[in-house]
């Protein structure tokens, strides 16, 4: 039985994580499926934001709990960061009280600035079935009650730019509802979205004062980017090292993805699919265009 190297790599394919090396000889679809598994690749700025949110989760309740706005370009890993915090703080049943404990309530993208939808989505994030068309006051009371009962320590609202995408009156209503939640329950809230949400939050000075902004900016083509490429290459089940982190290849990948991690992952997926179809043993810069990839800045012009 093959055992991993001390550093977790595969003895036959030392450029690969052990699990990636184990399926190098598998079929194309199995290798693609492995690469497409949801996984979190940590990096410095994401780690800093994660530590900040973890610190908030561990704090004792006080009258004014710290809240956050996490802003960054579209498709730059904000959702994955939020989900990674949720996975690190999984719901469980208290063995003494048999009561569910939900440390992190994660609300995915809402359709728009609807307070009714907000309370319904919050109940769903807590694992509570509900009728979205029920009287608003009922779902509101239930959500606030279950936040306390389930000892929730953080509410994450993903794609918050969707929730505030509407006329000013609706925007104020959703901002007020979110702020009301943390004021009444002492549960902190972290809103993830694009930088445009900052201008919307100017409508509610109390909201803006309570929420500190943290930026998850687009990547620079630097050593941190190259470290990310090394981590990514370790999960690409090809037998020959591609050298993604080499200077020329790293620059080409950065330009093709516009420095956004989500675009980068999709780019590598396209290149890997192409390499498997063509029977290639590794990736190369030419595959960026050969795979049919169109950079996001060019897509916007189509």
Image (cartoon, rainbow, N blue to C red):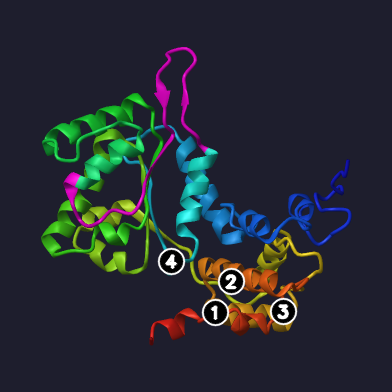
Between the residue at mark 3 and the residue at mark 2, the CA separation in whole angstroms equals: 12 Å
Give the labeled residue for mark 2: 270
Label 3 with label 2: CB-CB less than 8 Å = no
Q: Is residue 78 visible?
A: yes
- First along the sequence among labels 4 and 1: 4
Q: Is residue 182 visible?
A: no
Label 2 with label 4: CB-CB less than 8 Å = no
Label 1 with label 2: CB-CB less than 8 Å = yes
Magenta residue check for 80: no
In the image: residue 63, left or right of residue 46: left
Residue sticking out furthest to the top: 96
Between the residue at mark 4 and the residue at mark 1, the CA separation in whole angstroms equals: 23 Å
- First along the sequence among labels 1 and 2: 2
Residue 293 circle label:
1
Q: Report helix, strand or loop for mark 2.
A: helix
In what quadrant of the picture does the N terminus appear? top right
How far across and how far down the image is residue 85, in percent? 50, 45
Between the residue at mark 2 and the residue at mark 4, the CA separation in whole angstroms equals: 24 Å
Q: Establish if 33 lies above or below 146.
A: below
Q: Report helix, strand or loop for mark 3.
A: loop
Residue 72 circle label:
4
Q: Nearer the viewer, mark 4 or mark 1?
A: 1
Q: Establish if 168 lies above or below 34.
A: below
Residue 284 circle label:
3
In the image: residue 261, left or right of residue 105: right
Residue at coordinates 48% horizontally, 64% vertically from top-left? Answer: 216
């Amino acid at each position: 039985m093959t055992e991993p190297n001390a550093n977790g790599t595969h003895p036959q394919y030392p450029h690969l994580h052990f699990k990636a090396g184990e399926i190098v000889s598998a079929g194309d679809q199995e290798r693609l499926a492995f690469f497409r598994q949801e996984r979190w690749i940590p990096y410095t700025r994401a780690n800093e934001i994660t530590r900040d949110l973890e610190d908030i989760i561990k704090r004792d309740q006080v009258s004014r709990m710290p809240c956050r706005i996490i802003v960054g370009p579209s498709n730059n890993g904000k959702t994955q960061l939020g989900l990674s915090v949720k996975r690190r703080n999984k719901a469980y049943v208290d063995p003494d009280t048999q009561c569910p404990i939900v440390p992190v309530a994660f609300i995915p993208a809402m359709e728009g600035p609807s307070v009714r939808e907000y309370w319904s989505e919050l109940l769903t994030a807590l694992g509570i079935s509900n009728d979205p068309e029920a009287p608003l006051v009922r779902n509101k009371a239930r959500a606030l009650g279950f936040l306390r009962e389930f000892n929730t320590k953080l509410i994450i609202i993903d794609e918050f730019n969707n929730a505030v995408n509407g006329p000013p009156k609706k925007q104020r209503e959703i901002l007020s509802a979110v702020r009301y939640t943390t004021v009444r329950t002492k549960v902190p809230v972290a809103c993830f979205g694009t930088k445009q949400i900052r201008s919307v939050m100017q409508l509610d000075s109390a909201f803006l004062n309570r929420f500190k902004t943290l930026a998850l900016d687009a990547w620079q083509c630097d050593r941190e980017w190259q470290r990310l490429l090394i981590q990514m290459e370790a999960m690409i089940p090809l037998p020959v090292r591609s050298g993604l982190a080499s200077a020329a290849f790293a620059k080409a990948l950065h330009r093709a993805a516009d420095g956004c991690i989500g675009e980068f992952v999709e780019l590598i997926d396209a290149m890997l699919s192409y390499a498997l179809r063509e029977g290639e043993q590794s990736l190369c810069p030419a595959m960026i265009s050969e795979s049919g990839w169109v950079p996001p800045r060019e897509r916007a012009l189509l």
